[in-house]
C-alpha cells in the first residue's frame, strides 16, 4: 500500500518551510532528491530479493495523456474562473474540453487490452465507494493544507519555518497512527467505523478554522484544529485503502490501491482549485464592500474552510451507507475461539489460513482443528 498522500500531508511542510527560510523557495523542489536516493538505498538493503509476477501488455500512453490533459484543463479553468468570468468563452471552452477528454479517456479504457484504470474495478461496490470517498476527502485535505498555511503566513504573520512547526502536531499524530494504531482500530472495529469517525473528525477540524480570527493565537485558534485533523487523517487513511482492496483478489490489491491513490490526487487537485477560487472570490467581495484587507482575506479563507468541511461529511455519509461491512479476520477468529473450548498452547504450528496475516501481526499462530480455527500465542517460531 502506498502512503504517498499521508507523506505529502505530514513530512513535507516542515522540510519545505526550513528550506524556504534558508534558501530561495525554488530549492524546495530539490528536497526530495536526497530523500529518494536514501529510500532507494534502504529498499535495496531491507527488502527481500526476487522478482514479482511479470507484467504483460503495453503501457497505456493514450489513457495517461488524455486523463492528465483533462485534469489540467479543468483545474486551469477553475483557478482562472474568477478572473476570466465563469460564463466566459474561455472558461466554458476549457471545461468543455476537459469533459471531452475525460469521455475520450473512458472510451480508451473500455477498449485497450491493458488499461491504465480498469473500469471493471468500479463494478465492485467497495472499490467504487472507496474512490468516491477518496476524491471527497482529498478535496478537503489538500485545500486545508494550502489555505491554513496561507492563513498562518499572510494573516497571522508567521515565517515559513513557523508555519512548518505549526503543522508538527498533525505530523506526529498521523505518524503515530501509521505505525500501527490505525491497523489495530481496523482489527477491533472493522473498516467502516474508523473511516467514518476519522472523516467526521477532519470535518470538525475544518469547521474550527472557520472561527479563526485575524489576531488569533496558535494555542486557541490553530492547535485544536491541527490535532483533530491529525487524528482524522491518521485514523481514516488506512481503512480507506483497505476498503478499496477488500473486494479484489490479492493479486489485484496493488492495482486497487493505486486506483484509489490516483483518485485521491485528482480529488485533491480539483478540490484545491475550487476552494482556492472560492476564497479569492469571497475576499474580492469583502474588499469591494469596504472591509479591511486582512479581514477580507481571512473571510475568504473562512468561506473555503466551511465548504471544505462539507466534503468529509459527504464522504462519511457515502462510506457509512455504501461500504459493505466486512468482518476482520481477527474478530472472526476471536469469536470462534470464545465459542469453543480452549486448545492446548501450540508448539510451533504454522499459519496456513488467510487469517494468518492478522494473527501474525499479534505475534500469534493459527492452530488447525477439524471443527474450528483459533488464534493462540505461539511459543516457538514457525518451522
Image: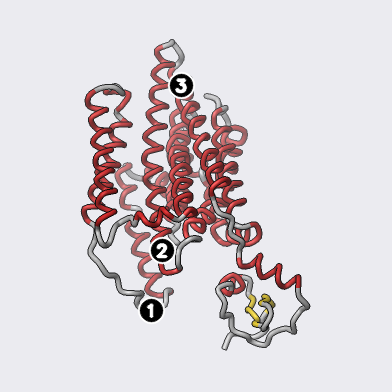
Between the residue at mark 3 and the residue at mark 2, the CA separation in whole angstroms equals 46 Å
Q: Is residue 169 visible?
A: no
Q: Are marks 3 and 1 in contact (CB under 8 Å)?
A: no
Between the residue at mark 2 and the residue at mark 1, the CA separation in whole angstroms equals 19 Å
- Of residues 62 and 295, the one nearer the viewer is 62
Q: Are marks 2 and 1 in contact (CB under 8 Å)?
A: no
Neighbours of disc 1 within 10 Å: few (<14), some (14-19), many (20+):
few
Please report whichever mark, 3 or 1, sits nearer to the chain's N-terminal start: 1
Neighbours of disc 2 within 10 Å: few (<14), some (14-19), many (20+):
some
Residue at 63% from the left image edge and 75% from the top image edge: 363
In this view, 343 is above or below 222: below
Kindly state the secondary structure of the residue where label 3 is placed. helix
Which label is found at residue 49? Answer: 1
Which label is found at residue 254? Answer: 2
Q: From the image, tell me which residue sits under label 3.
A: 294
In this view, 373 is above or below 191: below
- Of residues 118 and 131, the one nearer the viewer is 118
Neighbours of disc 3 within 10 Å: few (<14), some (14-19), many (20+):
some
Amino acid at each position: 500500500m502506498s502512503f504517498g498522500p499521508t507523506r505529502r500531508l505530514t513530512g513535507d511542510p516542515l522540510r519545505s518551510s526550513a528550506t524556504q527560510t534558508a534558501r530561495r523557495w525554488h530549492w524546495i523542489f530539490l528536497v526530495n532528491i536526497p530523500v529518494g536516493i536514501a529510500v532507494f538505498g534502504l529498499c535495496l538493503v531491507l527488502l527481500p530479493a526476487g522478482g514479482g509476477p511479470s507484467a504483460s501488455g503495453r503501457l497505456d500512453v493514450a489513457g495517461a495523456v488524455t486523463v492528465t490533459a483533462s485534469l489540467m484543463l479543468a483545474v486551469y479553468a477553475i483557478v482562472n474562473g474568477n478572473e476570466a468570468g465563469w460564463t466566459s468563452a474561455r472558461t466554458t471552452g476549457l471545461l468543455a474540453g476537459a469533459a471531452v477528454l475525460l469521455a475520450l479517456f473512458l472510451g480508451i479504457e473500455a477498449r485497450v487490452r491493458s488499461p491504465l484504470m480498469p473500469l471493471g474495478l468500479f463494478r465492485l461496490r467497495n472499490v467504487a465507494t472507496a474512490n468516491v470517498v477518496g476524491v471527497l476527502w482529498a478535496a478537503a485535505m489538500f485545500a486545508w493544507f494550502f489555505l491554513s498555511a496561507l492563513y498562518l503566513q499572510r494573516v497571522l504573520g508567521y515565517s515559513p519555518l513557523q508555519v512548518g512547526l505549526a503543522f508538527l502536531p498533525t505530523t506526529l499524530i498521523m505518524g503515530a497512527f501509521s505505525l500501527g494504531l490505525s491497523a489495530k482500530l481496523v482489527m477491533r472495529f472493522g473498516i467502516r467505523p474508523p473511516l467514518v469517525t476519522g472523516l467526521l473528525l477532519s470535518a470538525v477540524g475544518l469547521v474550527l478554522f472557520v472561527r479563526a480570527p485575524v489576531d488569533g493565537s496558535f494555542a486557541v485558534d490553530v492547535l485544536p484544529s491541527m490535532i483533530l485533523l491529525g487524528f482524522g487523517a491518521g485514523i481514516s487513511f488506512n481503512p480507506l485503502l483497505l476498503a478499496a482492496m477488500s473486494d479484489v483478489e490479492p493479486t489485484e490489491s496493488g492495482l486497487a490501491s493505486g486506483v484509489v491513490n490516483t483518485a485521491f490526487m485528482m480529488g485533491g487537485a480539483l478540490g484545491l482549485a475550487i476552494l482556492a477560487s472560492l476564497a479569492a472570490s469571497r475576499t474580492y467581495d469583502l474588499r469591494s464592500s469596504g472591509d479591511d484587507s486582512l479581514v477580507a482575506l481571512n473571510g475568504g479563507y473562512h468561506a473555503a474552510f466551511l465548504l471544505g468541511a462539507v466534503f468529509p461529511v459527504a464522504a462519511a455519509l457515502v462510506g457509512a451507507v455504501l461500504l459493505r461491512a466486512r468482518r476482520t479476520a481477527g474478530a472472526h477468529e476471536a469469536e470462534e475461539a470464545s465459542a469453543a473450548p480452549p486448545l492446548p498452547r501450540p508448539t510451533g504450528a504454522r499459519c496456513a489460513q488467510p487469517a494468518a496475516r492478522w494473527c501474525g501481526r499479534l505475534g500469534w499462530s493459527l492452530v488447525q482443528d477439524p471443527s474450528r480455527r483459533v488464534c493462540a500465542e505461539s511459543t516457538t517460531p514457525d518451522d
